[in-house]
Structures are given as structure tokens and as C-alpha cells.
Amino acid sequence: MYAQMIKTAHKGVHKREDMSPEERAFQDKIDADIKIEPRDWMPDDYRATLIRQIGQHAHSEVVGQLPEGNWITRAPTLERKAILLAKVQDEAGHGLYLYSAAETLGETRDELVRLLHEGRMKYSSIFNYPTLNWADIGAVGWLVDGAAIVNQVALQRTSYGPYSRAMIRICKEESFHARQGYHAIMKMAFGTPEQKKQAQDAVNRLWFPAIMMFGPSDADSTHSEQSMAWKIKVKSNDELRQQFVDQTVPQIEYLGLDLPDPGIKWNEERGHYDFSDPDWSEFFDVIKGNGPCNVDRLQNRVAAWEDGAWVRDGLLAHAEKKAARKVAAE
Amino acid sequence: MTVDKNLLLQFLLRQGDNTLILGHRVSEWCGHSPVLEEDIALANTALDLIGQTQMWLGYAAEVQGEGKTADDLAFLRDAWDFRNVLLTELPNGDFGQTLMRQFLFDAFQSVLMGRLMGSTDETVAAIAAKASKEVAYHVERSADTVVGLGDGTEESHNRMQAALEYLWPYVGEMFESDETDAAMAAAGIAPDPSTLRAEYDALVTRVLAEATLTLPESRYAHKGGRTGRMHTEHLGHLLATMQWLQRAYPGCEW
Amino acid sequence: MKNEWPLWEVFIRGQHGMSHRHVGSLHAPDADMAIKNARDVYTRRNEGVSIWVVEARHIAATAPGDKGPLFEPSESKVYRHPTFFDIPDEVGHM
């Protein structure tokens, strides 16, 4: 998802008999669905894991501006340009809300950004894929935001109060993202043969990267158990992936596009769609930095940050001078 | 009083092309600003400008009466048809240059929109009424940023002074007037731009003084954009990007 | 890099809201810019008609551990709530 492969500091789940009285009280609250708030006692691992998860989520929003931002200046109509710009702007807002949530845990935004730029924190694998034609913009809104929202809706119930509240706000704002994406790709799929070709190309290219967003299969996901016990992860990777596939296949069919995976088939017995496993070696390559856009994405972020240093410093210096002048005048 | 349709069209294209081209430039920042808060604010400015473009060019298309839309005008004209002032098509440069350009334009718009609200043309007055609220915020924000950066660190001050020197020769064009402007003024549709200069100078001088920046002495003005006589080389590249899809796949619905 | 802009808490009163509600935080060099940033970040969807910003370090808050002593005593004062009192229907709305 937007936060993938988040490691907890230890393996397995804390056992109740090994817990300190504080930790037991903490776990009781979580089990009773009482939110943990910034100044509450929390285990160091919980805090560290959350910082990694929320930080990665925030980084994903901000890096996620880039693939869609790639098309703002080429949007084909004024309305599409406005919609796309508003949408990418929302991603910046979501990044901001999430960094704020992480800041309540005692980690500054600047520090998280530094860790990202040094390659010590990650962002979602999906944003290392390129957007190559206009239909990709539809597909990203529909498939990528669609996948994200499946996860984020679940995360509204996460145990950490500020994270949960950020998710609620984000979900409210995101509801238009998937719809505008589907609306845009509908125009392409029902348009000229050339437009339809672009739509098919977009779905073919982005399908597997989108379902990889949920992370590796539960069987191979070693870090989930403690996160589930802490309710910072609410549903399993496979559960969320299945939910996404089930809701998306009929949407592809409605567009009259070929399914991007020959393995997609309705399974009467399970009451779900079967689908092929993505190539997980590709996923791990992307995570390691070898995706098609990893280097560019990070360079872009670092450049924006470094080129902007004089602006941040300048405005702060002015604010300080102004405050000093005010004090002197009083 | 009736006004020549073609002159009114020229006037509307000048308004719509200014906001179209500047909105496009500002939108180039999305995802690349110095800090998230500024990224979001710049996107808001660009969105306002795109919205104003839809109104100005929508009305222009209506006046033209050839069954075209605002999109047709934005995406299917070539460089010599554009009537924006050169200032709006200049490249973004660094963040300081972008904000200085924004301020120099916002200041003009804030004076102009105030007058256009009293236009004898109801549609022009209505567009100006909506735009004036947006512009009032834009100029406040860009002025604050120009002051903050001008009076910030030595580096930010120097960059802002350099931006001002680069952009100042493009300010004069906004106050040019020709037969179109004379006709608009005579019909009470819009003021003659040359009559706005004193108010503009007062605003700009005050803000730049607060920003500790020095106004260049030369009043030399590059021009040609608003008459279409001569644009900068930058416009063609902007249009090549902006119009590409519409040009490559003509007649599609998007 | 110790020059991060200060953190501000943002409170917004909506169209029909009676009071300002905390909506989130942001960074800004000073109060003026914090208000402008709040307008751009937190009122993109017509959410507000009034904005307050407070620098986060100036907010004093209760400690979570004090929750018992601070708030539980009020739980037993049910007579402060109107539904505590049974008023006969014949009396009418009160």
C-alpha cells in the first residue's frame, strides 16, 4: 500500500505475560478500540513503527505528485487541467496531514524528509512507474487511488488517534479522485480507436503494479502480526488485494477493455475473482531502487528541497526580523 | 453604445490569454515547490487563473460567434494569435522569480479588476466581480512573499533583486494602449490601461520598499504580446506542451 | 538543519459552526503566513469562514494521566443534565 513492508523492531507478537503493566494497559485500550493519543504512554516499538508507517505514507503522497504532475501541463482541456491540478494538490495536502500526524510522535517533518532524501525511508513502489500517455492519468486516479482508498478506508479505524483522524480527512477528500480517474478513462475507452488503445495500454501497464501496492502475500509478510495486534494495520495484504480486484474487474469490463490478466476469472465457490500473482521479483527490485523511475523521482524531490532552501530560510529570517522589530518598538 | 465585435474579442483574448498563460506557468510548480504549504498555495493560484480563463475565453468564443469553445481558443490557436502580455509567458526561473512575476501581475490585475467591475458590459462586470476576490488574495499573498524574501537573508534579497531587474522591463507593456483600448474606454467596457499606472506604481513602490528592493530606473518596456506583433521564444514551447494532445489527436472528446 | 518553520495548530469555524474546531497543523514562518497557509491548505473545499492559528508550543494541554481526576468527577453530577429531571407531560415543553 502507500506504506509497504513496514518492519516492526521485533519478530512475532508481544505476549501478554511478557508485558509490563503499562504495556498491558496500553494493549487493553487498543483491544477496546480506545484511540491512543500523542501524550499517552506507548511502547517504543509502537512509536517507531508508526513513525515509519506514517512517514512512508506521507512520502508516498508527496512523491506521488510527480507521476500525475507529469501531465498537468499537457492536460487536453482547461477542465481536465483544473481537475488534475486540484487532485495533485490534494496529494500535497495529504502528505502535509500525514507529516503532521508523524510530528505528534516527536519526529519533525524536516527529519523525515531528510531520511527520504538519504534513501533511508521509502515510499510506495507504485510511484516508481512512469505515466506515458494521457489515459495513464485516468488509470492512476482510478486504479492507484482506488487501491489506496481500499486500504485507507480500513485505516480510518487505526489505533493511533492523529493517524486515524488524518485518514478520515483524506478519505473524505479522496472520494473524488478515483471517480475523476474513471471518468477520464471512460472518455478514452469510449472515444476514438486511438484513445481506446491508450486506455488499454494504461490498464495493461498499471494493473500489476497496482495490485502489488498491497505488498507481498500474507504468507510471506513477516511483519504484519504485531502491527495487526496494535491495530496500525487493520486488514491483511491479501484481504485488501482481493477486495480491490473484486471491485475493479467489473469496472474494467464496463469500459469494454480486455482484462489485463488472463488469470482473472470469477470463482463461484469462493465468491471472489481469481487472479494471477504479480511478479514479486519485480516488486522487490522496485523496492530496492531499481524501478523505472526510482532515480528520477528521488532526484526531483531532492532538487525541489535543495533549490527551495533559500526560500525557506529567507522567509524565516524575515519573520524573525519582523518579530524583533516589533519587540523593539514595544 | 455598441462596440466593434472584433475589438471586443481582442480585449477578451487579452484577458483570457493572460490568465491562461500565467496559470499554465504557475501550474508547472506543482510537486516542485520549496515547501508543501507553498506548493498547495501556488496550485490554488493556478486553479483560480484557469477558472478565470474559462470565463474570459468562454465569453470571447461567444462574442466571436463561430461556435467555438474556450478550449478551442486555448488549444487550437498558434503563437501569433495569442494576446497575453510577455510578462506572463516568461519562464518560471527560481521560486523568487515566479513570485515576483506573480506580484507584478497581481498588482496590475487588482487595479484592473476593480475598474472592470463597473464595466458597461454585464458579462465583463460579472467575470471581474468573481475574479476580483481571487485577485485580492493573490496580490496579498504574493506581496507578502516578495516582502519576506526581499527582506530575508542576503541570498534571498539578492535573488529577488535579480528577479525584479529581469522582470521590470516587461511591466510597461501592461499599460500600453491602442485602438482596442480606446474603443473599450469609449464604450465604458474597460479603462484605458495607461490610466491605471499611477495606482499601480503606488502599490508596487510601497511593497518593493518594504521588501528593501530597488526599483530599476529604466522604464524601457518590451512589448508585442498583447498586440500579437511579437512574442518571446518561450511561448512556442509552452504551447507545444499545452496543445500537444489536442493537436496530435484532433476532434477527440476528453 | 535547525531552521524548520515553526509548527502551528489550525482552528476553523465553518459556515454554520458555533465554534472553532481543530482541523490540523502546518508549518509557517510567522502568524500572518500561518493564516494564509491555513486558508490555502484547510479551506480548499469551502470549509470555513474564520481561521485561528496558534503556535503549537504555546498550547498547554492536560496530561493523559490526569484524565481520571479531571473528568470523572463530572460524570457523577448527572443533575447538571436536563434529562435528569422528570417533568410531567401536562406541564408542556420545558
Image (cartoon, rainbow, N blue to C red):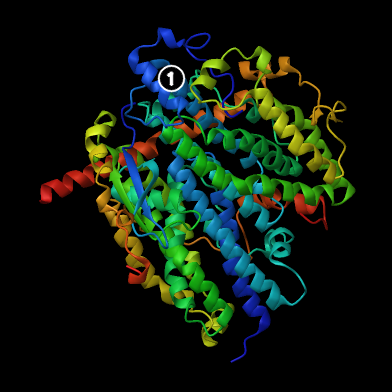
Residue at 75% x, 27% y: name it: A208
Query: B219 or B88, which lies in front?
Result: B88
Above or below — where is A19 with respect to B58? above
Q: Nearer the viewer, residue A9 or B115?
A: A9
Q: Can residue B44 be seen from the camera position used here?
A: yes
Residue C88 relative to residue B38: left or right: left
Q: Position of residue A293 (x, y in %)?
A: 65, 26
Which corner quadrant of the image does residue B140 belong to? bottom left
Circle 1 residue: A46
Rendering coords of residue A216 (x, y %): 67, 18
Q: Residue at x 29, y 39 (%)?
A: C56
Where residue A193 sits: x, y (%)? 89, 47
* Residue at disc 1, secondary structure: helix
- Residue A114, image x, y percentages: 44, 24
**Label 1 crowd bin: few (<14), some (14–19), many (20+), radius 10 Å:** some
Comparing A27 with B235, the one in front is A27
Q: Horizontal placement of A322 versus B228: left or right?
A: left
**Residue depicted at 61% across the width and 72% down the height:** B12
Left/right placement of residue A183 relative to residue A152 reads: right
| Any part of residue B224 in sight | no
Q: How many marks?
A: 1
Q: Which chain is disc 1 placed on?
A: A
Query: Would you place residue B137 above or below residue A321 in this image?
Result: below
Amino acid under label 1? Tyr
Q: Where's the N terminus of chain A, which quadrant? A: top right
